Image (cartoon, rainbow, N blue to C red):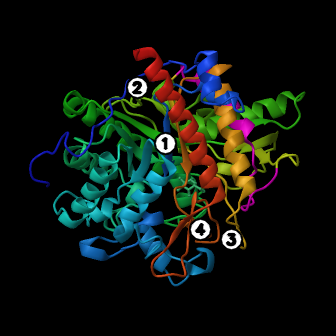
Amino acid sequence: MRKGKRRGPIGSVHPVKLRCRRIRTVLQEDIIISIDHSDDPSMNMFPEDFAWGASTAAYQIEGGWDADGKGESIWDAFCHRDDSSVFERHTGDVSCNSYQLWEEDLRCIEELGLTHYRLSLSWSRLLPDGTTGHVNQQGVRYYNQLLDGLLARGVTPMVTLYHFDLPQALQDRGGWQSPDTPALFDAYARFCFGAFGDRVRLWITLNEPYVCAKLGHEDGLHAPGVRGAGGVAAYRAGHHMLRAHALAWHSYDAGYRREQGGLVSMAINSDWAEPEDADSAEDAAAAARYLAFSLGWFAWPLFVSGDYPEVMRAAVDARLPRFSGDQPAALGTADFFALNYYTARKVRSVGVDGGAPSMKTDLGAEGVVDPAWPLCGLPWLAVAPQGLRQLLKYIKATFNHPAVYITENGFAQTGPVLMEDGERAAFYRETVGEVAKAIEEDGVDVCGYFAWSLLDNFEWADGYSARFGLFHVDFSDDERARTMYRSGREYAAIISKHRSRSRAHRELTSS
Ligand code: GAL
């Protein structure tokens, strides 16, 4: 436990409201001209306190996999397997070495001019065996330094408690298949709220439970590597993650919110989905199913009904766990909508083949890439910024107009490194333009945008073959030198324009 609470002197904690302020920074014409933003009308649309961020995750950047008392996580174990399926058997053992080079990360954050930085805590660095029975003080010290460093630079942290890296000790007890894991997660969450909550106002409990459930417990591509579990294990894992989230949210609400005044949500990922044939009722229903089985799987329980979407219940039937009335309700346990968006799909209906149950046959739909959308690096990553606007509109309509943070969005490069990455720079420009339209034309309450990622890093099953960074990281160099890509300069310029506009607006309204 850290001794005593430090508040204030290390930097101000920015207050956040339950709804982000819907103030538009539309300035008087003469101010616009005098600070020369006439080239970029989209910059008018962002609320003054909009969060401009970038995201990372512990396993993907920290390295130090067994340093200073850290316990093993399921990703350590997965990458160390003799039959590892990760690209060229890469591991996160060292990665960007942010465990030692965190001050370099702060420099990168400053260089970009970010207002916010989303990081995740490594559960097994803090609690090596996953339980609060033993706290690794060196881990606590590491995150204290990082959080203090952010606040000292005026950067607001958004902290994810769980980004795919379950302590292996808990996996040995059943992991997300075990009904005991939610309570263990809740104890870990309470530990973190107590240790860091004096400086953190934006919490994400779990990152992308969809990916963790499906890729980790059905496709076997992610840790813990469960494959072909007949459409059972993934739903069970997802259910336990929802329960874990609900417990942690209620713990925060009851025990910490009054003093700490923060907000808690879960980061939900989804493609945008639209019918392949706009005139086909089957394709329209398939696209709706596609959204229900990704976004809806986790958003319905939190925002709509406390249960899974009807269409999932109907298709999966007895294999989909039930929420029980004597457990804390999931409904209402998201203080904002945290969305990870990467790509879009055209969706067609496909018949059930009558084979063994699986998530694929439950879905009865197939998503394909529109040939008009360019692919960046990875085969799944069709570039479709317009899909983000569509998804934001859908979220506003379906989930009762929540405040939304886009907690991840990005563009990968593969192959030879391209420092002058004009396509990615254009991608960020275009995407921010789509967010501006969602705010201004569709009235979506978007509070922030976090680029994935601050740094090139360990991209899960793709190892280091896919680079998502705003900064290039030289993995062949012990120093892990970080160098800003052109896309980083582009994003920094977007942020700087907005921030100078906000400053001008503040001066104008306070004079
Ligand atoms: C997300 C994940 C991130 C990152 C990103 C790019 O699913 O949360 O950790 O890897 O994808 O593929």
| Secondary element type, mark 2 | loop
Q: Which residue is mark 3?
A: 417
| Secondary element type, mark 4 | helix
Q: Nearer the viewer, mark 2 or mark 1?
A: 1
Q: Nearer the viewer, mark 4 or mark 2?
A: 4
Q: Position of residue 254 (x, y in %)?
A: 22, 30
State yes or no: residue 399 in magenta.
yes
Name the residue rendered at 47%, 58% in the picture. Answer: 108
Residue count near mark 1 (Cα–Cα under 10 Å), binned few <14, some 14–19, many ≥20 = many
| Secondary element type, mark 1 | strand
Q: Spatial distance from mark 1 to mark 3, Cα to Cα? A: 30 Å
Inspect the image, locate mark 1, and give the three-letter code of the amino acid beneath it: Ala
Mark 1 or 3, nearer chain start: 1
Q: Which residue is mark 2?
A: 332
Quarter of the image where ligand 1 sits: bottom right
Q: Which residue is mark 1?
A: 267
Query: Which of the numbered marks, if any, corresponds to residue 461?
Result: 4
Look at the numbered discs 4 and 2 and tell me whether their residues touch, using CB distance below 8 Å.
no
Residue count near mark 2 (Cα–Cα under 10 Å), binned few <14, some 14–19, many ≥20 = some
The magenta segment is 374-401
Q: Nearer the viewer, mark 4 or mark 3?
A: 3
Q: Position of residue 178 (x, y in %)?
A: 37, 54
Q: Is mark 1 within 8 Å of ligand 1?
A: yes
* Quadrant (top left/top right/bottom left/bottom right) for the N terminus: bottom left
* Quadrant (top left/top right/bottom left/bottom right) for the C terminus: top left
Mark 4 or 1, nearer chain start: 1
Q: Spatial distance from mark 4 to mark 1, Cα to Cα? A: 20 Å
Q: Spatial distance from mark 2 to mark 1, Cα to Cα? A: 15 Å
